[in-house]
Amino acid sequence: MKKTFYSNGKLLITGEYVVLDGARALALPTKFGQNLIIEESDNNLIHWKSHDHDGSIWFEETIPFSSVIEKKQNDNLNNIKNTLIEILHEAYKINSNFITESKGYKITTELTFPKFWGLGTSSTLINNIAQWLEIDAYQLLKNSFGGSGYDLACAQNNTAIIYQLIEDRPVIETIVFHPEFTNKIYFVYLNKKQSSKEAIASYIEKQGSIEKTITIINDLTKKVSNATEAKEFAIALQKHEIEMSNVLELSTVQEALFEDFNGVIKSLGAWGGDFVLAISKENPTDYFKERGFNIIIPYSEMIL
């Protein structure tokens, strides 16, 4: 019997990096996500096939049950396979039934967005596996990838959320976020995928005393999520960029790439890659395309 599970992608609007230290963050689930399709098979093997948004296969492997049980990661050149074995091994430690009570699987994943977009290829996978095995997705994340877990909250919710870690436990508040000015918001892909793991490691290395920053970001998250006018939304985003620029000791993306942009641009998630948010009075598509950034998605086409 075939079973299918689905999880939403994500965009972190405020609180990048400092969400790890307990800051309140605004996150939005996307209309894009990932399917996980499970079919029974045999020979104590997992035949795994991952499809990109266009149907092309970007990963295909056969993994013996024994590799999952013993966490056998022999192929140093195949990091994707090793990561998958690690996730499945950690899932096995929480609930071993999917191995002990099965003869094998044919497993297929299907992204509805290009995998290089950074909308949550890993988080949607972890949440789908957790749904399949009826285990705690946050526990599986903690034991495998690590991270704040806001992306899992987006995977599981169809509305905007305020996400916070309190004593390392996720606290999720679902909110209504449909300001009238969403027709002025666009998401622009920066033409390169950013590693969340590397970005987090860099942040941890650079952070000093973060308490003051958390207070500032919490206030800005509130202002961004409650904004009723485009101008107050844009000003709060700009202040957020300046604050995080100081913490990370990096130029804002607007300073580095779009200094002459007539509006406000904010990094989303890991600085320096994936998507940025742009808010402007006029449609900025031509501006970005002239500078070689061809993926510009209006708010209405990106956000659930």
Image (tube, grey):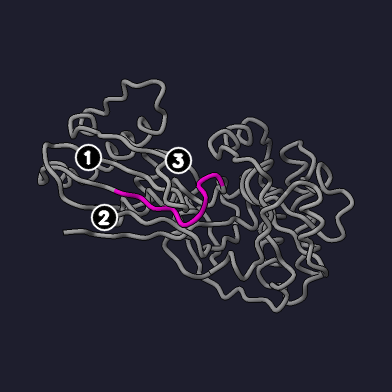
Tag 2: Cα neighbours inside 10 Å, few (<14), some, or many (≥20)? some
Q: Nearer the viewer, residue 147 or 69?
A: 69
Going by the picture, which residue comes out furthest to the right? 260
What residue sits right under mark 3 in the picture? Answer: 146
Q: Is residue 289 magenta?
A: no
Q: Quadrant of residue 183?
A: bottom right
The amino acid beneath tag 3 is Gly
The quadrant where residue 36 appears: bottom left
The residue sitting at 78% across, 45% down in the picture is 252
Residues rendered magenta in the picture: 108-116
Horizontal and vertical percent for residue 218?
66, 58
292 and 186: which one is in front? 292
Q: Residue at 49% across / 50% down in the picture?
A: 120
Label 2's element?
Answer: helix
Q: Which residue is mark 1?
A: 46
Find residue 140 and name its label. none
Q: CA distance from mark 1 to mark 2?
A: 15 Å
| The image quarter in which residue 300 lies | bottom right
Q: CA distance from mark 1 to mark 3?
A: 24 Å
Please give the name of the residue rendered at 60% of the width and 37% of the height, measured from the top-left corner: 199
| Mark 1 or 3, nearer chain start | 1
Position of residue 71 in the picture relative to residue 265 (left or right): left
Mark 3 is surrounded, within 10 Å at the Cα level, by few (under 14), some (14 to 19) or many (20 or more) other residues, namely: few
Among numbered discs 1 and 2, the one appearing first in the sequence:
1
Q: CA distance from mark 2 to mark 3?
A: 20 Å
| Residue 299 screen position, x and y as percent | 64, 67
In the picture provided, is 112 more to the left or to the right than 213?
left
Q: Which residue is mark 2?
A: 132
Task: Give how far across and how far down residue 193 sits, in percent.
Answer: 59, 40
SS at mark 1?
Answer: strand
